[in-house]
Image: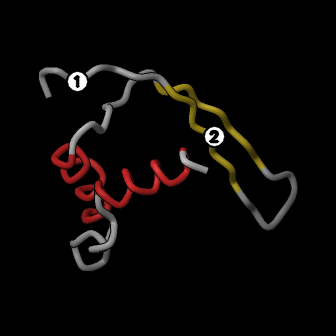
Amino acid sequence: MPNARTLGYSVLYRFNLDHKPKWIIGLDVGHGIPIETAEDFDAWVRGARAELSDGGTPPPDVTYQKIVDLARQIRNH
């Protein structure tokens, strides 16, 4: 994506092991890609979900519009 902006965020890994101690490791990630359009969402989110699914397809109910609607609903409450 030629017009992609880089973002920064932190990732927290938790290892829930049967034995103590439970480990928590933090990692700063210095880049990311903003999801601004339905096409971005399909490429990055639905594409990743498809790669990780057993059948090779993302869940049909995971859509950009449903996420946008949910965000609006949260903002309005």
Q: Earlier in the sequence, mark 2 or mark 1?
A: 1
Direction right: furthest residue: 20
Q: Mark 2 vs mark 1: give the one in front.
A: 1
Which residue shows up at 55% across the image and 51% down it?
74
The numbered mark at residue 4 is 1
Q: Position of residue 51 (x, y in %)?
A: 26, 62
Q: Residue furthest left?
A: 2
Specify few, some or many for label 1: CA neighbours under 10 Å numbering under 14, 14-19, or 20 or more. few
74 or 62, nearer to the observer? 74
Query: Residue at the location (16% across, 47% down)?
Result: 39
**Viewed as shown, does residue 9 lie left or right of 22?**
left
- Determine whether the residue tagged by mark 1 lies in a helix, strand or loop: loop
| In this view, 56 is above or below 51 | below
How many angstroms separate mark 2 from mark 1 (CA)? 24 Å
Q: Which mark is residue 12?
A: 2
Q: Which sits in the foreground, 25 or 1?
A: 1
